[in-house]
Image (cartoon, helix red, strand yellow):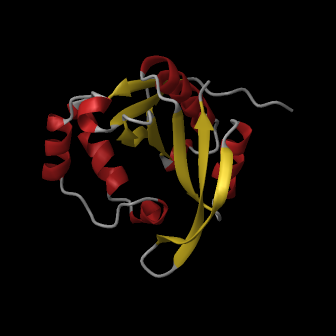
Amino acid sequence: MNKTVASVKLRAMEPEDLELLYTIENDRSIWGVGATNVPYSHYVLHDYMAQATGDIYTDKQVRLVIENDKGEVVGLVDLVNFDPKNLRAELGLIIQKPFRRQGYSEATMLKLHDYASEVLHLHQVYAIISVENKPSLALFQKLGYHQSDELKDWLFDGKTYSPAVIVSKIFQ
């Protein structure tokens, strides 16, 4: 049975999103899958939001809020580590717990692919994923990402190191 892809809208961050950003950035349960390992204050995040231009060439990143068709905020997606010479960026995606396993990740990535290739004119996006995150790996594979070699002891959750892989998608 084919599951229908959820409907999402990607939009710029607004001042009203500060609490969402604070909640996600300070969720220790997801620190092991990314580069965050310290809590962020409201002040630091407010300052980040105030200074972000929304221009990937200036900020070297762009962060977007994901909304479903009811206008509910379901998560965040970002392109970071933008490399203007090689036209590539690292993709980060977090769906809030109540909205997981409902097709929002796939819908978001499809919208982001269009934005990255047609608006930003990126040649490539990539992500670093724990080898233990089977649902994410399956989704990236479904969406045509190529998986590279395993990165030993790449992610640290505060107690142990775990391997990861780099997955990438090239836009033609």
Q: Going by the image, does 120 lie left or right of 21?
A: right
Q: In x, y percent, where is residue 39?
A: 26, 63
Does residue 35 appear to the left or right of 134 in the view shown?
left
Outermost residue toward the front in this view = 85
Residue 150 x/y as whole percent: 64, 64
Give the residue displayed 51% in from the left and 50% down from the top: 97
Q: Is residue 69 visible?
A: no
Q: Quadrant of the C terminus?
A: top right
Towards the viewer: 118 or 18: 118
Q: The N terminus appears in which quarter of the rendering?
A: top right
Image position of 43 with respect to 113: above or below: below
The correct choice, above or below, for 161 with respect to 86 in the image is: below
In the image, 158 versus 18, the foreground residue is: 158
> What residue is shown at x 55% (from left), y 28% (from top)?
113
Q: Quadrant of residue 63?
A: top left
Which residue occupies 64% across, 63% down?
131
State the count of labels: 0
Does 5 sit left or right of 37 as displayed? right
Give the residue displayed 24% in from the left and 41% down from the top: 18
Determine whether 98 is above or below 72 in the image: below
In the image, residue 32 sits, relative to residue 78, either above or below, namely below
Considering every residue shown, the one lying at the far top of the view is: 118
In percent of width and height, residue 89 lies at 44, 40
Report the front residue among 123 and 4: 123
Direction bottom: furthest residue:
159
Would residue 17 be visible to someone looking at this image? yes
